[in-house]
Image (cartoon, rainbow, N blue to C red):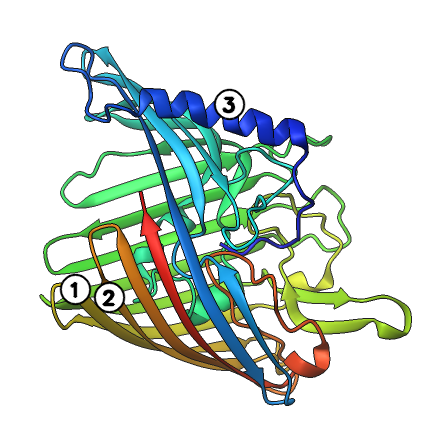
Amino acid sequence: MPSPRSAPAPSAARRLALAAALAGAAVGASAQTPSPSTGSAVVLYGSLDQYVNHMRSSSGTHVTALEDGSLLRSRIGMRGTEDLGGGYAAKFQLENGFSTDTGGQADGSRLFDRQAWAGLYSASLGEVRLGRQNGPIFARGGYIDFTTRTLGSVINSFGVPSRYDNTVSYISPRIAGVLGEVHFSFPETVGGVARQAVWQAGLDWQNEFARLGYAGLRGRPPANAPFGRDVVYDNVFANWLYGRGTVYLAFVRSNNSTSATTGTGASATTINNGASILGNVGGVVAGTNPDVNRMYHIWQLSADYRVTEQLRIGGLWGRIQDRSGSGRNANGGALGAYYDLSKRTTLIALAETIRNDDNAGFRLAGSGALKSNFTSGSDVNGRNINGVQLGILHRF
């Protein structure tokens, strides 16, 4: 999911550490089938996701760039399972995000920016994880629209909470089609465990023909904050699986959007919906932003259809509504096609638009942050932004 900030290049020591860690994982991954005697395995995996992006604003400005992360942000990771006997297992996952177009890390301040957790698993009791990990909102992206809530998704343009540090989670087994999970992220700040904590929860039911579910978040401000309202993100969804495709209906209620200022001095400019109050990939709520009192509702309808075993097409349309009455509303839509050259390699083609009302400032967004984006308020606020993307995704 898009990162709220650019990261510096990793140090030589960090690059060496990453190389050593992945080299060790490669040894364990040489035989990816669990040992018959131990039921244990370590797997090396990853994805390379590159696309050419052309965007044009109704201001007349345009940008063309090679970007990373249309559907899956480029990453390399390792995950492992150790059979402990009695139906129990120990598990871990370490995952590093990077940009294939530059070779740089997605977050130069972290070695494993995407996930770094260890846990215990039981098929009958569920799973407990401790560490940096994806949350239930991120995990249900495939239930939100034909893009799996990535490039082309109106909901994704609003900004989606993805993962947080210092998290303890519980994920239940799926029973009678129902799965639930809860996450608690320790703020590790003065003022008590509950203050500035991030709570997340998810619940969904599915059968052969339908899915229904909810995923949500609460980020608490510190005690006596100037603006004491929680940051919230509530997402409900319903899917109809009709054989050759899926119809998706999704609704989001959130106040996690605020302005962003770029440039300094005379060149400073403000994008009205250019940032989130609670970071999408980490952080806590400071309680100092008045935009927490501005609530948004987002409706989105989407559908896809598998034309052949290799070709899937889809479309969506969505509406972002500013419930505070200050006019930060937007509409958007997308059409896309995904062609599987093999089980591992997919060609991607998308055309999308976001149409901002006079006071709104939403931009297109992918699975990873766009390194080349509109950075002037005059190109975003109140503007229509159209984009066309062509790319390739390879998974290993």
Identify the residue under disc 3. Answer: 20
Q: Give the class, few, some or many, for how many residues have Cα within 10 Å of label 2's Cα (few <14, many ≥20).
A: some
Q: Amino acid at mark 2?
A: Tyr
Determine whether, in the image, residue 181 is placed left or right of residue 360. left
- Give the number of the disc on residue 339: 2
In the image, residue 288 sits, relative to residue 154, either above or below, namely above
Q: Who is closer to the viewer here, 231 or 107?
A: 107
Nearer the observer, disc 1 or disc 3? 3
The number of numbered badges drawn on the structure is 3
Q: Residue sitting at 38 percent across and 59 percent down?
A: 71
- The image shows residue 95 at horizontal and vertical percentages of 45, 36
Q: Residue sitting at 63 percent across and 76 percent down?
A: 361
Q: Who is closer to the viewer here, 188 or 4?
A: 4
Question: Mark 1 near mark 2, Cβ–Cβ under 8 Å?
Answer: yes
Q: Amino acid at mark 3?
A: Ala
Q: Tag 2 or tag 1, which sits nearer the N-term?
A: 1
- Give the number of the disc on residue 310: 1
For label 3, the SS is helix
Question: Mark 1 near mark 3, Cβ–Cβ under 8 Å?
Answer: no
Determine whether, in the image, residue 116 is placed left or right of residue 45. right
Q: Tag 3 or tag 2, which sits nearer the N-term?
A: 3
For label 1, the SS is loop
- The image shows residue 327 at horizontal and vertical percentages of 62, 83
Determine whether, in the image, residue 15 is placed left or right of residue 226. left
Q: Amino acid at mark 1?
A: Gln
* Cα separation between marks 2 and 3: 35 Å
Q: Tag 3 or tag 1, which sits nearer the N-term?
A: 3
Q: Looking at this view, name the residue that lies furthest to the right.
A: 265
Q: Give the class, few, some or many, for how many residues have Cα within 10 Å of label 3's Cα (few <14, many ≥20).
A: few
Quadrant (top left, top right, bottom left, bottom right) of the C terminus: top left
Residue 91 in sight here? no
